[in-house]
Amino acid sequence: MDKGNNVSLAEGQEVKLKRVLSLPYLVVFGLAYLAPTVVFNYYGIMTVMTNGMMALAYVITTIVMFFTAYSYARMVEAFPVAGSAYTYVQQSMNPYFGFVTGWLMLLDYLLLPMICYLLLGIYINEFFPQIPIWSIVVFFVVVGGIINIIGVKTAAKVNTIIITAQMLFTLLFVIVIIKLLLGGDGAGTLVSSKAIYNPEEFNMGNILAASSILAVSFLGFDAVTTMAEETINPKKTVGRAIMIVCVGAGIVFAIVSYFAQLAWPTAFMEIQNEDAGIFELLPRLGSYMSTLFFVTDNLASFICAMAGLAAVSRILYGMGRDGVLPESVFGRLHKRFQTPALNIIITSGVALTAIFYSDNLMGAASLISFGAVSGFLLVNLSVIMYYYVRHKKRGPANTVRYLIMPAIGAIVCAILWISIETPAKILGSIWLLIGIVYLAFKTKFFKVAPPVMDISEEE
C-alpha cells in the first residue's frame, strides 16, 4: 500500500506529499508548463529568422533537447524525489553545485508565472481596455494560487480541460490550412520539401540561432520531475512522461510550423511585425481565428502560470526540507491539503509583482533561458558523474547511455548558453552572485558542507 496516500494527520506524525499522479496527469502537467500554443507566439520571429524554415528549426531543437530529456529520465530513476535539477546535481556532483543549480533554476521558475500573469493582463486589457491590467493580474494570481494549494490533482484536472482546448485549436488550425491548400491557396499543395528545407534561403547560422531560442519551449519536461514525490511509481512513470512530453511537443511544434509555412510561403519576406506575426497569418485563415487564438492563448498562459507555480513551490520545498533554505518556512506542508501551501503563497507574491513590470517584460523574460540552459547543462553532467564515474557503469552499452548521450546533451547546452544575449548573462550572473553569497553565509564561508537531501523513500 502506498503510504504517501494514507498519511494520518494526528499530532506528531509526519505530513508527506500525496502520491496521486499517474502517467497521463504528468504528461498533461508537462504540456501545461510548456503550453502547446507557444509555437504560435514564436511564429513571426522564427519565420523571419529562419527564412521560412521554422519547422526545420523545431526538428533540430527536438533532437537536441531529446538528449537532455534523456539525462533527466536517467537521474529521476536514481533520485525520484522533489527538487529536480537541484537534487540531481547535489547528489551526484557536489552539495555546493547542487545549491547553485537550484538557485539558477529558481530564477527560471520564479519569473515564469509572473510573465504569464502579466501577459494575461496585457492581452485581456487589449480586448477589454476598461479592465485595468493590475486587476486582471491580481484575479488570476489569487485563483491560480488557490487551485495549487487545494492540490495538484485538482490542478491537473483543470490543466486537462485547457490543454484539450489548446490541442483542439491546434487541430483546427491545421484543418483550416489543409482546406485552404486543397482550394489552391497558399502553397497549393500538402507536400512541399521547401516548407522544411529551402536550399535557396537556407542559412545554418540562423537555424541554430533559432534553435537556441526555441529550446526554452521544452521546459515542460523539467517541470515534470518536480512532481516525483506525488507520482505513483515515480522511477518508471516520471522518466516516461519526460520523454513523451519532449518528443510529443516537438512533433506538434514541427507539424504546426510546417502547415503555417504552407499557408503563407512568403511570410518571411512579408511579415510587418515579427512579434505579432501570428495575427497577420490568422486573418488569412478566417476572421474568427484571431478571436479563438486570443481565448486559447490566454488559457494557455494561465495554466502555464499554474504549472510554474506548482513546480517552483516544490523545488523550494525540497531545498527547505534539506535546511538549505529555512525549513520552518519552505520545508512545510499544509496538514489538510498536503501541499507546500506557504511556498505557493510566497511564489504567488512574486508573481503578483507583474503589475510593476509592464515596461520591462523582455528584461525579465530573457533571464529564463539563462537559468534553464545552465540547469540543463549541469543535469547532463550529473548523469556522467553519477553513473559513469561514481558507479562505474562501463562497457559499450553503458558508455553510450551514461557517457556519450549526456555528453552530447552537455555540449549542445554549452553552445546554447554561449548564444544567450549579453544583458541576460549579466543579470543572471548577478542573481548567481547573490546565491553564492547566501551559500557562503549558510556554510560559514564554505567551512561546512550544505545540508544533504534525505533521499530515503517509503514505497
Image: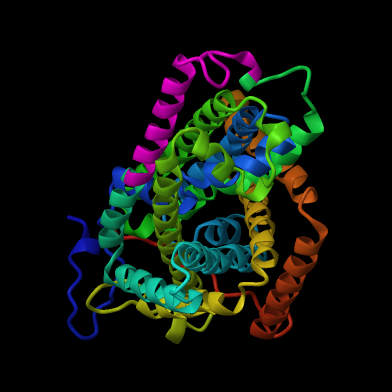
Kindly identify the residue that appears in the image at 25 percent across and 56 percent down.
20
Residue nearest the observer in this picture, 157 or 161: 161
- Viewport quadrant of the N terminus: bottom left
Residue in the image at 42% along x and 49% along y:
291
Q: Is residue 309 left or right of residue 158?
A: right
**Whole-percent x, y for residue 62 in the image:** 58, 34
| Residue 79 visible to an observer of this rendering | no
- The x, y position of residue 286, in whole percent, is 44, 36
Residue 340 position in % (x across, y down) = 37, 74
Residue 289 or residue 32, whichever sits in front: 289
Give the main secondary structure of the magenta stretch. Answer: helix
Examine the structure image and report whether residue 185 is included in the region drawn in magenta: yes
Q: How is the image coloured?
A: rainbow
The segment highlighted magenta reads: 165-194
Q: Tell how many labels.
A: 0
From this view, report whether residue 87 is shown above or below residue 35: below
Q: Position of residue 81 (x, y in %)?
A: 42, 59
Residue at x 63%, y 24% (from the top left corner): 265
Image side of residue 15 versus residue 287, left or right: left
Residue 208 lies, with reference to residue 189, above or below; the image says below
Image quarter hosting the C terminus? bottom left
Task: Quadrant for residue 339, please give it.
Answer: bottom left
Nearer to me, 394 or 421: 421
Seen in the picture, residue 315 relative to 55 is either above or below; the reply is below
Front residue of 420/285: it is 285
| Whether residue 27 is visible | yes
- 373 in the magenta segment: no
